[in-house]
Image: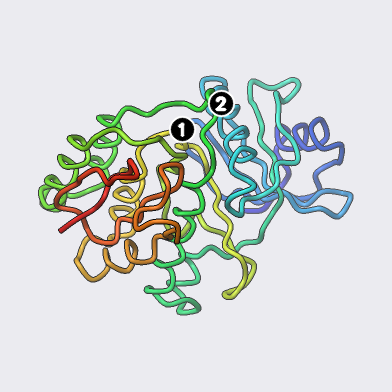
Amino acid sequence: MTGAVPAVVSRAALALVGAPARTACRLSVRSRTAVYRTDLADGRSVVIKLYATTARRNAAMESAAIRAVADHVPVPTVVGYGHVPGHEATALITSDLGPLTLGSAMRSGLVSDERALKDLAGLLGRLHRAPVQPWAPRRPFYEQVASLGRRCPPSRLDRIGPALAAIADASPTALVWCHGDLHGDNVVLARPRAVRHLVDFTDAAAGPRESDVAQTLVMTDALSPLRARMVTDAYPTTACCPHGPSSTPCAPGRTPTRATTAPCGNTAWTT
């Protein structure tokens, strides 16, 4: 939706990146956030995400999370962040990577379903290699299961229940940066063969990598054995040992029914 530039968007652009906004196209609006694609007077195009006062902490965490993982996975550049003067809002301003998402490319036939699932798995693996800082929020496992329950039909939740129980009972492993909401529309690309960029870190937190894989399987409807294998088989591995060193991701490899601890200290996924 393009029209007159909202006052809060105009003020955010001028105060945080030093350039007036010429146009603003609303991309999404939720209870506590709104996102606009904005053309600036200096020729740049940016994405401005506005957070309500009650979501100020989320704004700070999303900005910090993007910066924290930027050396490990492609993400937009943070060009501005802070309180919007004269408004009860906080803004996160990032580089505009374009309107094409992996989800829209898949729906239009530009990218195959299999390719999209493999791309998501690759992004997950790269994200999970990013070191977790002490300040990173921890998301309890029960909250992750509750999130899956809200997004997954009861019949499917019953199917993945044994896997979730296995993850919960497994020996603790090192936490990784989890995206928490990875699906095709949270991946942006300039064209079908271009680099995939991970966006929307609203739910990012430190947690077990297995829960992030489970979230992705649910969000992409990849719960059938064939589709699940497309994701888990494409999840990156390392060559140094079958499960990778304890500081790097252990590839699921299979939709899990039992979790054990490998000698390297990672959770090994077995059927």
Residue that mark 1 sits on: 31
Q: Are marks 2 and 1 in contact (CB under 8 Å)?
A: yes
Category of crowding for the residue at label 2, using alpha-carbon neighbours closer than 10 angstroms: few (below 14), some (14–19), many (at least 20): some
**Quadrant of the rendered image containing residue 113:** bottom left
- Amino acid under disc 2: Ala
Q: Sequence-wise, which precedes: disc 2 or disc 1?
A: 1
Viewer-proximal residue among 33 and 255: 255
Specify whether 3 is left or right of 177: right
Residue shown at the point (24%, 61%) measured from the top left:
254
Relative height, residue 151 to residue 220 (above, below) = above
Judging from the image, what secondary structure is the residue with disc 1 in? loop
**Quadrant of the rendered image containing residue 53:** top right
Residue that mark 2 sits on: 52
Q: CA distance from mark 2 to mark 1?
A: 8 Å
Residue shown at the point (15%, 39%) measured from the top left:
165
Viewer-proximal residue among 156 and 133: 133
Q: Which x, y percent locates residue 202?
A: 50, 37
Specify whether 125 is left or right of 192: left
